[in-house]
Image: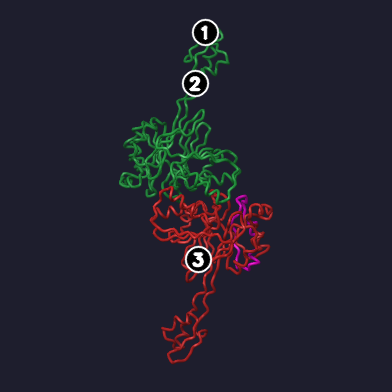
Chain colours: A green, B red
């Protein structure tokens, strides 16, 4: 799993900083998470093969998280896209996009499928053989969801030399991968555990932006391999968190610790801070494994 | 009068090229003309004092001409703007902007005044003591206007030494500036022309993008000091003009010649061309004074 940060600053795009957008590569999917203004340029800048994006997840309808979506959709049209595009986001997003396409008399060379969200409970919103995605309801000034992306437990791996030693026919390999005990060529039952390895443990990634400090989200993100949590403010501006419904770096670290995540990635910094090192410093006092998102940075998860 | 090109390419924003947006400085106004995605970043990049923009003119509702507007409006809110913002653009633009502000639960710290356009005739849409702005109906796939910005004829200038020689009292200076003959301190009538200079001849700028070749626009842009006319294609792709309703560089030059303009500025280049010099070459065969727009370029008009 690989996470490319396209933008990780709050509020307004500037010459050298971009609003929220990231691409998660997971089991052959390219998922786009949020899409602030300029995201399509960031996708080009970091050479993401963005025609492969088939699913876009929008956390909430503040501009720094979605104003780039209509431009990306239009560019897909100009580029002759034919593949479906699925958009997951708060109720209202469909009206915004379709109104602009209608007034621009846009043609539709590919289907856009909207999955509008309005539940306050966590929901399974995407699932295939290898991946599932759930919403993580958050607490912000407008209806907001984070998302948790989970690999499913894969097949068991064959221990080929043991499989051969045990004289198991090829036609049974699939059953072995699925965890069954099987009969060998001599009619003996072979215990699965003797001839297979455990599958890789599935990885998971949670995206939580934007939100006030909200421990109620912990059950939905517990034990994830990596958590991106917004950290708009440093401690010195903690009093700004309440009216704006944002978090400090320390509050993000408290969530990471309580949720027992593997790694915490901070982002959504207020543009008032010229130097980000204090974000890491303040969070590290509470939770050890902290990384700072930066535009263009790639995290292996 | 000064024109700053923020973006002059068609279709999709890329790492080093931007969709249409320009700032016209005219008689102490900063007028923003079109506002493609990323315009607010371009305004910052070229250090335009963009809080001074009070009037935005949108030609048509294709994304490369207005997708940056909602972001700019939002940034004005975040920056605590209080001054009115006037938006002139096709019917529908108000619905697009207000829907997004409503769904984002935006607060309004400044008034936005929409002037929605739907006439197919040229209209006077802005006027003050020194400037007037008219629409220039164009021919494109959706309802589109260009705009012509005209300085008004200013006051006559006093020839101070002659005014003193002629013994004209200070209380008559304003009348002189307005062109009247006046009585001097000895009761003699003094001819205005003897003691004043002609005012500077008023300048004018016309913006025509996007449009097919459309000579019907000529009466509305005749004799302007400078004309920006779209030139999406070179001659080799002239056949693309009809379905897309765009122009070639030569067609732009034909319009410039027939309209007897002072200078032609080309822009709105298709992103298929790596080298722009042929645009100038092809247009110059028909009209002599041709300049190429480039992102960041400033034209003194």
For label 1, the SS is loop
Question: Is A107 a magenta residue?
Answer: no
* Percent x, y of residue A190: 50, 11
Q: Earlier in the sequence, mark 2 or mark 1?
A: 2
* Residue appearing at x 60%, y 47% in the figure: A107
Q: Is residue B22 visible?
A: no
Circle 2 packing at 10 Å, graded few (<14), some (14-19), many (20+), is many
* Residue appearing at x 45%, y 42% in the figure: A90
Displayed quadrant of residue A222 = top left
Circle 1 packing at 10 Å, graded few (<14), some (14-19), many (20+), is few
Q: Which residue is mark 3?
A: B126
The magenta span reads B255-280
Q: Is residue B265 above or below residue A146?
A: below
Foreground mark, 3 or 1?
3
Question: What separation in Å lies between label 3 and label 1 (alpha carbons)?
Answer: 92 Å
Question: What separation in Å lies between label 2 and label 1 (alpha carbons)?
Answer: 21 Å
Q: Which residue is mark 1?
A: A188
Q: Which residue is mark 2?
A: A156
């Amino acid at each position: 799993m690989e996470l490319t940060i396209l933008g990780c600053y709050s509020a307004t795009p500037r010459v050298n900083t971009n609003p929220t957008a990231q691409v998660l590569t997971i089991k052959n999917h390219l998922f786009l998470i949020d899409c602030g203004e300029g995201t399509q340029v960031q996708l080009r800048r970091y050479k993401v093969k963005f025609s492969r994006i088939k699913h876009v997840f929008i956390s909430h309808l503040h501009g720094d998280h979605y104003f780039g979506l209509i431009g990306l959709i239009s560019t897909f049209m100009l580029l002759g896209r034919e593949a479906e595009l699925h958009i997951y986001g708060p109720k209202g997003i469909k009206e915004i996009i379709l109104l602009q396409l209608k007034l621009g008399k846009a043609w539709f060379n590919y289907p856009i499928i909207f999955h509008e969200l309005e539940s306050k409970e966590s929901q399974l919103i995407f699932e295939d053989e290898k991946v599932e995605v759930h919403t993580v309801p958050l607490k912000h000034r407008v209806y907001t969801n984070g998302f948790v992306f989970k690999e499913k437990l894969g097949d068991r791996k064959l221990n080929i030399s043991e499989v051969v030693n045990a004289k198991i026919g090829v036609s049974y390999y699939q059953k072995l991968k699925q965890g069954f005990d099987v009969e060998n060529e001599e009619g003996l039952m072979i215990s699965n555990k003797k001839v297979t390895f455990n599958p890789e443990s599935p990885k998971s990634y949670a995206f939580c932006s934007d939100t006030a400090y909200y421990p109620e989200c912990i059950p939905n993100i517990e034990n994830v391999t990596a958590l991106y949590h917004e950290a708009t403010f440093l401690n010195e501006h903690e009093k700004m968190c309440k009216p704006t419904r944002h978090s400090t770096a320390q509050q993000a670290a408290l969530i990471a610790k309580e949720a027992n995540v593997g790694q915490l990635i901070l982002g959504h910094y207020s543009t008032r801070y010229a130097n980000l090192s204090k974000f890491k410093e303040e969070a590290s006092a509470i939770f050890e494994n902290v990384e700072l998102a930066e535009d263009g940075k790639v995290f292996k998860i």
